[in-house]
Image (tube, rainbow, N blue to C red):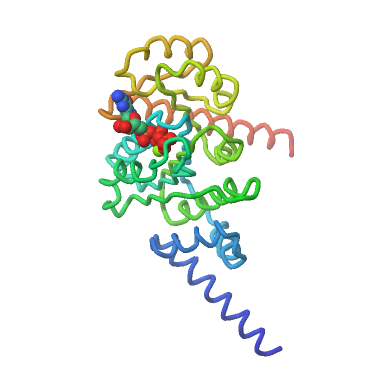
Amino acid sequence: MFGSSLQTRREAGDFSALADRVKAGNVPALSRLITLLENQNPSGIAVLRLLGSGPHHAAVIGITGYPGAGKSTLVAQLVAAYRRSGMKVGVLAVDISSSVTGGALLGDRIRMQKHTLDPNVYIRSMATRGHHGGLARAAGDATVVLGAAGYEVILIETIGVGQNEVEVMDVASPVVAVVAPGFGDEVQAMKAGLLEVAPIVVVNKGDLAGADTTLRDLRDWCSTVLRTVATTGEGIPELIAAIAEHQRLRDLQGASARLIRKGAGF
Ligand SMILES: Nc1nc2c(ncn2[C@@H]2O[C@H](COP(=O)(O)OP(=O)(O)OP(=O)(O)O)[C@@H](O)[C@H]2O)c(=O)[nH]1
Ligand SMILES: [Mg+2]
């Protein structure tokens, strides 16, 4: 009896020590916690609860699209841009080792390489967990952990093909759908699926033939369609501005909804 309460107390102490290290921005501590949460470890969940109480203001931005559209190259450019404005940036690359592109993980590492030495950039890949919704939950939990650790922008890259990946995007706002020119069938499929969850569409590889046609095609469908060349950085300032504008409108809508609720006495 006495022993078990001592153990409980010791565990509680361990939990709060881990939570404190995460809040102090300790990278090994937050990595450990994210791993615990990926495995749905009860200790991890207990620590997450300790973090959940404080306000976190991290912006969570989703980057989704078909394999090879240039998502990681785009993410690397966004990381650079947010770092230039002094923000601490987290990147969650979800299920990037797609069966379609094979060695994508290695490619992603190379594209992100220059950022891995920056102590204000945290990059982590998260793999698909077997059960339904598990990956989305783990990614959502990871954004809470990173927010508590002081990351101001969290970019989540995912391949927008399966239901699992689309669910991951529930935790992001806005979601940016990335498409490359000349993928006619994929653009049609995106219209049916991805574009519903993505208020911003990027036609990346804007340097390739066919970009204009794809842009025109998508502009009939979605109000914010931008052209980027992720390999050179062209169009990135415009994308950053579109993301900021979306966040501003969303926050305004949230604030007015709260006012209406207050006025109605809810
Ligand atoms: N020409 C051109 N090539 C690009 C551009 N952006 C990315 N690429 C190239 O496209 C290839 C795929 O880029 P990634 O950034 O790995 O694409 P991804 O969407 O992250 O790929 P997955 O993670 O496998 O789905 C790489 O060889 C990039 O160098 C661009 O704007 N123009
Ligand atoms: Mg990638």
Of 180 and 148, nearer the camera is 180
Q: Residue at x 69, y 35 (%)?
A: 261
On screen, residue 177 versus residue 25, left or right, reads: right
Question: Is residue 8 in view?
Answer: yes
Question: Is residue 74 in view?
Answer: no
Most extreme residue toward the right is 265
Q: Residue at x 58, y 75 (%)?
A: 12
Query: Which quarter of the rendered image does ligand 1 occupy?
Result: top left
Above-or-below relation of 169 to 88 = above
Above-or-below relation of 200 to 154 = above
Q: Residue at x 53, y 62 (%)?
A: 36
On screen, residue 89 versus residue 133, left or right, reads: left
Q: Quadrant of residue 178?
A: top left
Above-or-below relation of 264 to 213 = below
Q: Quadrant of residue 46?
A: bottom right
Across the whole image, how many numbered discs are drawn on residues?
Answer: 0
Q: Residue at x 60, y 80 (%)?
A: 9
The image position of residue 112, as x and y in percent, is 31, 44
Of 115 and 88, nearer the camera is 115
Query: Where does the C terminus fall, quadrant-wise?
Result: top right
Query: Where does the N terminus fall, quadrant-wise?
Result: bottom right
The image position of residue 74, as x and y in percent, is 35, 33
Above-or-below relation of 40 to 128 = below
The image position of residue 72, as x and y in percent, is 37, 37
The image position of residue 115, as x and y in percent, is 29, 47
Most extreme residue toward the bottom is 2
